[in-house]
């Protein structure tokens, strides 16, 4: 998943009908999947905006995904509540700046994914005082 924008384009047809029309094996671990520790199950990324569809690069339904774009999702209208490292809870709008979703990332470089990407990294050392 080197181009987050392609994830959104691919998911557009699925979300247009309001439901997933293509399902796959969920790793055959129905009762223990929440304890698996895989990013596509227990984590989220600050690349695609809140409440966007998730994309997982996975060819084998019984194996770990090799790439995950999993934004936080919520039933709250217009965004999600996020727990910050300092214990604060902030509401993040679906329209938060996500920068350039047409590019990949470079390790240790600032996030190309705008304010949202900066909130999810420490390695780029982006100052994010108020969003």
Image: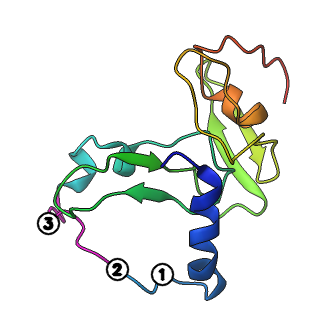
* Mark pair 1, 3: CA separation: 19 Å
Percent coordinates x, y for residue 26 in the rendering: 24, 67
On screen, residue 81 versus residue 42, left or right, reads right
For residue 124, which numbered disc appears in the image?
none
Q: Upstream in the sequence, badge 1 or badge 3?
A: 1
Percent coordinates x, y for residue 28 in the rendering: 14, 66
In the picture of the structure, the residue carrying the numbered disc 3 is: 28
**Residue located 27% across and 51% down the image:** 34
Is 129 placed above or below 63 here? above
For residue 23, which numbered disc appears in the image?
2
Span shown in magenta: 23-31
The secondary structure type at the circle numbered 2 is loop
The secondary structure type at the circle numbered 3 is loop
Q: Nearer the viewer, residue 40 or 78?
A: 40
**Residue located 77% across and 34% down the image:** 114
Q: Quadrant of residue 25?
A: bottom left
**Residue located 58% across and 13% down the image:** 123
**Residue 74 in view (yes/no):** no
Percent coordinates x, y for residue 111 in the rendering: 67, 27
The secondary structure type at the circle numbered 1 is loop
């Amino acid at each position: 998943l080197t181009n987050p924008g392609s994830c959104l384009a691919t998911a557009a047809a699925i979300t247009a009908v309001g439901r997933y029309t293509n399902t796959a094996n969920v790793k055959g671990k129905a009762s223990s999947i929440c304890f698996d520790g895989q990013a596509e199950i227990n984590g989220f990324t600050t690349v695609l905006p809140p409440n966007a569809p998730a994309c997982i690069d996975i060819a084998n339904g019984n194996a770990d995904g090799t790439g995950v774009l999993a934004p936080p999702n919520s039933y709250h209208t217009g965004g999600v509540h996020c727990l910050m490292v300092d214990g604060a809870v902030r509401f993040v709008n679906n329209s938060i700046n996500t920068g350039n979703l047409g590019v990949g990332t470079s390790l240790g470089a600032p996030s190309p994914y705008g304010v949202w990407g900066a909130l999810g990294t420490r390695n780029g050392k982006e100052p994010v005082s108020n969003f």
